[in-house]
Amino acid sequence: MMLRQRIKQEAMNRKDNTMMLSSEFEQSYRTATPHPEPCLIDRCPLHETCLHWWCKRFVDTTHTQITTVNPLHPLTGTAQCPLYLSSERVVLKRGLFDFFDQMTSRQEHAIRSSLMQLFNRKYYYRIRNGEMPITPAMRQQIEDVCRQHGYTGPFVYDSEEEGWAW
């Protein structure tokens, strides 16, 4: 294959991957609850890798008012933005049905209560039922709670997938 054809083919592959990634990102954005607020600050040094900035492409244009990242906050639009969410894909876990199988009933009860206090009852059940993905940060919190209650065994989630940590 000639160099020119190979370069053209690589460009087409990159375009196909970008289109697929964009479509996959849009689907993930549409199903995320709550939706991340879009960021409209194009001058931000972090905008290329921030999920909030990526979300602006999917804002419903039929609305005259939307909720966005506050452009007047002193740290938004800077390298220290407190709302920055990396656009890097991560491993997300789902469901806690098998999670408590290896624990004693005393540990299970204490850990469930602590997780309900941590996430609130509604979100705990959404996490347990697999309706809400468990981000790496949430997974760390869950595992810290388990360790506080003396559980040292394996952490078994119902499934895992790759996606964005909203």
Image (cartoon, rainbow, N blue to C red):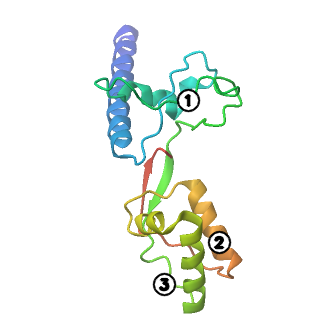
- Left or right: where does residue 35 sit relative to residue 62? right
Res. 129 image quadrant:
bottom left
The kind of residue tagged 3 is Asp
The residues tagged by marks 2 and 3 sit, at their Cα atoms, a distance apart of 16 Å
Q: CB atoms at circles 2 and 3 under 8 Å apart? A: no
Q: Which residue is pictured at 38% across the width and 8% down the height?
A: 4
Q: Quadrant of residue 138?
A: bottom right
The quarter of the image holding the N terminus is top left
Q: Position of residue 49 (x, y in %)?
A: 55, 29
Q: Are marks 1 and 3 in contact (CB under 8 Å)?
A: no
- The numbered dot on residue 49 is 1
Residue 12: give x, y in percent of width and height: 33, 19
Residue type indicated by callout 2: Val
Q: Which of marks 1 and 2 is nearer the N terminus?
A: 1
Report the disc number at residue 101.
3
Q: Which residue lies furthest to the bottom in this view?
A: 105
Q: How far apart are the alpha carbons under marks 1 and 3? A: 39 Å
Q: Name the residue under label 2.
A: 145
Among numbered discs 1 and 3, the one appearing first in the sequence: 1
For the residue marked with disc 1, what is the amino acid?
Answer: Thr
Dot 2 alpha-carbon crowd within 10 angstroms: few under 14, some 14 to 19, many 20 or more: some
**Element at label 2:** helix
Q: Image check: 84 left or right of 125?
A: right
Where 84 sits versus 108, above or below?
above
Residue at figure coordinates x 70%, y 76% from the top left: 148
Query: Helix, strand, or loop for circle 3?
Result: loop
Q: Which residue is drawn at 42% across and 69% down?
A: 125
Q: Do the CB atoms of the residues marked 1 and 2 lie less than 8 Å apart?
A: no
Image point (35%, 23%), residue name = 64
3D distance between C-alphas at marks 1 and 2: 31 Å
Q: Where is residue 99 in the image (x, y as percent from the top left)?
A: 49, 76
